[in-house]
Image (cartoon, grey):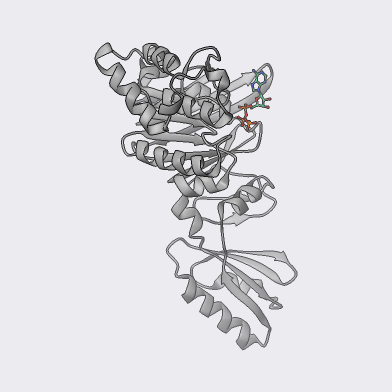
């Protein structure tokens, strides 16, 4: 339902988002990760039509943002990094104003505001001027305005920023709930957030997609870590279903298998080969991959591709 194609944006001569393409289906929660300055906010602003792209396009249900920014903005909810909330307004006044900006008709406006207040647990603060609210409550106001009108696409920049652990849990449940009827893009620095919420992750590096993968696939690596003094690497390479053999340290190897391979089966073949050769086998296990490790590898220029294989010291590649 959302197609981002060749999206590019420069500030002067600096390219902040560089030819980014991906699609998201309805009901998916996409986590957008990247170091400070990777281009996440720039990309989200372009997807939501608040920043013009230099090249490329964004289509929501086939409708281009270039020609229909206003119409698309009615279909999306956006929680920006820095909330453009009006400090002197009360929460109720602000939500009323936000509902008008979204073009909600009088018929649905009151119900929608009530729904957003309930979802974000803001009833106690309705008459409080926004400047008197804590960071966490301001964040909830931002989320409340984003979900007004039941958007098809919800874009959340650091949604749990400033929230305490209990509010964070509440916000995660809310995002899950919303995702039943909407596509969600969520930018965060918090890996646990992606782990807890997302179906899929895109890691941006220097404005480009360094990884685009389903979380499920990422976690089930087909790599074997081997610790041995066995020297005949070409013999390992001959084993059926072994794709690459990488020497990480003198006695540590990383063996990438085909996606269809059985890890226990190949492990047993490898063990047999080493033991029969008279070499020492110190350890053999399936590589543990968590998002944090992958994120760090990518930012150290380690290639991770869609087969879950990786190579050190190579260009980071787009796995999409
Ligand atoms: N208005 C601007 N003018 C000039 N450069 C900008 C502007 N906005 C962003 N940049 C630069 O573009 C790059 C990407 O910025 P962006 O805010 O999109 O990154 P980000 O991934 O969201 O970072 P963060 O995690 O720190 O929010 C950065 O190097 C930033 O300095």
Residue at 62 percent across and 20 percent down: it is: 10
Q: Is residue 38 above or below residue 293?
A: above
Can residue 214 be seen here? The reply is: no
On the rendered structure, is 11 left or right of 263? right
Residue at 54 percent across and 44 percent down: it is: 165
On the rendered structure, is 122 left or right of 17? left
Q: Is residue 30 above or below residue 228?
A: above
Residue that extends furthest to the left in the rendered view of this protein: 107
Percent position of residue 307, x then y: 49, 55
On the rendered structure, is 98 left or right of 168? left
Q: Is residue 48 above or below residue 272?
A: above
Q: How many marks?
A: 0
Percent position of residue 262, x then y: 45, 70
Percent position of residue 37, x then y: 66, 31
Between 109 and 248, the residue placed more toward the observer is 109
Q: Quadrant of ligand 1?
A: top right
Residue at 47 percent across and 76 percent down: it is: 265
Between 152 and 286, the residue placed more toward the observer is 152
Between 289 and 210, the residue placed more toward the observer is 289
Quadrant that contains the N terminus: top left
Between 209 and 35, the residue placed more toward the observer is 35
Can residue 274 be seen here? The reply is: yes
Residue 81 found in image quarter: top right
Residue at 49 percent across and 68 percent down: it is: 241
Percent position of residue 204, x then y: 58, 37
């Amino acid at each position: 339902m959302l197609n981002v194609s060749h999206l590019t944006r420069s500030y002067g001569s600096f390219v902040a988002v560089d030819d980014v393409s991906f699609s998201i289906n309805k009901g998916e929660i996409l986590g957008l990760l990247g170091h400070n300055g990777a281009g996440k906010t720039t990309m989200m602003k372009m997807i939501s039509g608040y920043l013009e792209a230099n090249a490329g396009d964004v289509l929501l249900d086939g409708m281009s943002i270039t020609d229909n920014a206003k119409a698309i903005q009615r279909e999306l909810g956006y929680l920006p990094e820095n909330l453009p909330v009006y400090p002197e307004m009360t929460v109720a006044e602000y939500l009323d104003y936000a509902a008008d900006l979204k073009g909600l008709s009088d018929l649905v406006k009151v119900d929608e505001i009530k729904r957003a207040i309930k979802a974000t647990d803001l009833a106690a603060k309705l008459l409080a001027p926004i400047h008197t609210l804590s960071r966490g409550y301001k964040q909830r106001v931002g989320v409340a305005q984003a979900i007004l009108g039941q958007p098809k696409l919800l874009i959340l920049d650091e949604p749990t920023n400033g929230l305490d652990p209990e509010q964070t849990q509440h916000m995660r449940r809310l995002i899950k709930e919303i995702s039943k009827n909407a596509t969600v893009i969520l930018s965060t620095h918090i890996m646990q957030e992606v782990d807890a919420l997302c179906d899929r992750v895109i890691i941006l590096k220097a404005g480009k997609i360094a990884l685009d993968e389903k979380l499920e696939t990422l976690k089930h690596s087909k790599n074997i870590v081997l610790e041995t003094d066995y020297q005949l690497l070409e013999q390992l390479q001959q084993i059926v279903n072994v794709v690459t053999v990488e020497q990480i340290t003198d006695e540590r190897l990383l063996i990438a298998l085909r996606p269809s391979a059985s890890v226990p089966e190949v492990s047993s073949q490898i063990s047999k080969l080493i033991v029969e050769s008279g070499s020492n086998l110190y350890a053999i296990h399936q590589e543990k991959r968590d998002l944090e490790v992958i994120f760090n590898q990518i930012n150290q220029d380690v290639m991770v591709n869609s087969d879950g294989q990786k190579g050190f010291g190579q260009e980071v590649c787009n796995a999409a």
